[in-house]
Amino acid sequence: DIQMTQSPSTLSASVGDRVIITCRASQTISNWLAWYQQKPGKAPKKLIYKASSIEVGVPPRFRGSGSGTEFTLTIDGLQPDDVATYFCQQFYSYPGNFGPGTKVEI
Amino acid sequence: EVHLLESGGGLVKPGGSLRLSCAASGFTFKTSAMSWVRRAPGKGLEWVSAFSGSSPRTYYADSVKGRFTISRDDSQNTLYLHMSNLRADDSATYYCAKEGNYGDFDFWGQGTLVTVSS
C-alpha cells in the first residue's frame, strides 16, 4: 500500500498569512492526489483534485501543486473560515489512503 | 443536486454487528463507484471499503477485511456496509462517499456515528 505523510500536524497562523501544508507519498503517484478540508462536525469537502486542479466553488486562495511524491497545499491569505483539518489523499491505487491530516488554527 | 444520507449508526457491544445504509440521490447511482470512509475521534480519515461502479468488484482495508461487507441495491439507490465482530477501534463516524471522475471523492454524506463499547 502507498503510505501518505503530512507536515506539519498542527499549524497556527494569523489572518492574512500564507499557509503551506506538505504531503508526501511513499512511492510515486504522478498527480493522482486530492486535498480535502474538514471542519469540526462536518463532512470532508474536496478542494483540489489531480494535485493542482481546483474544485468548482472553492476560493482561489487555495492552490495545489506538486507531482511524483511531494505535494503542497497553499492558502494565500488565511481567513477565519479556513480553520479546519486538511487531508491529502492518493488515488493512484487502491486503497486510496489519506494523509494523517494538518490542523490549521488561527 | 447530489445528496448522500447515512443511517444505521449507534451503540453496539464488542463482537456485535451493525448495518449502515447510505441513501443516494441526484446522480446515476448504478454506474457510480461508492466508498465508505471513517474518522475515529482524534484520528484522521481512513478509507474502509469501496464498490466499483462498472463491475461488481469490492475492496476492503486490511483492518476490516473478513469482518465488513459492502453491498449496494441499485434499485433503491442505496449503499450498505454490513459490519460484524465489531471492536472498540471500529468506533468512528462513518461517511459514505461518491467517487469522482479521477477516483477521488467528490461528494460526501454527513456521516453516522458508530460506538463500540460494553
Image (tube, coloured by chain):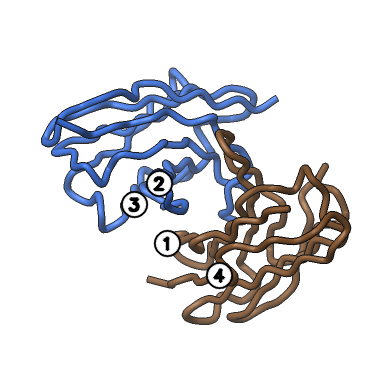
- Label 2 element class: strand
State whether discs 2 and 4 lie on one chain.
Answer: no
Drawing shade for chain B: blue
Q: Do callouts 3 and 2 mark residues in contact (Cβ within 8 Å)?
A: yes
Residue placed furthest toward the left? B15
The residue tagged 1 is A94
For badge 3, the amino acid type reads: Tyr
Earlier-in-chain disc, 3 versus 2? 2
Task: From this view, report whether residue B27 is shown above or below residue A70.
Answer: above
Report the front residue among B30 and A23.
A23
Q: Position of residue A12 (x, y in %)?
A: 69, 61
- Which amino acid lies under the numbered mark 4 shown in the image of this protein? Gln
Secondary structure under tag 3 reads strand
Q: Position of residue A26 (x, y in %)?
A: 47, 79
Judge the density around disc 3: few (<14), some (14-19), many (≥20) Cα neighbours within 10 Å.
some
Q: CA distance from mark 2 to mark 4?
A: 24 Å
Residue B50's disc is 2
Which chain wears brown? A
Q: Nearer the viewer, residue A13 or A57?
A: A13
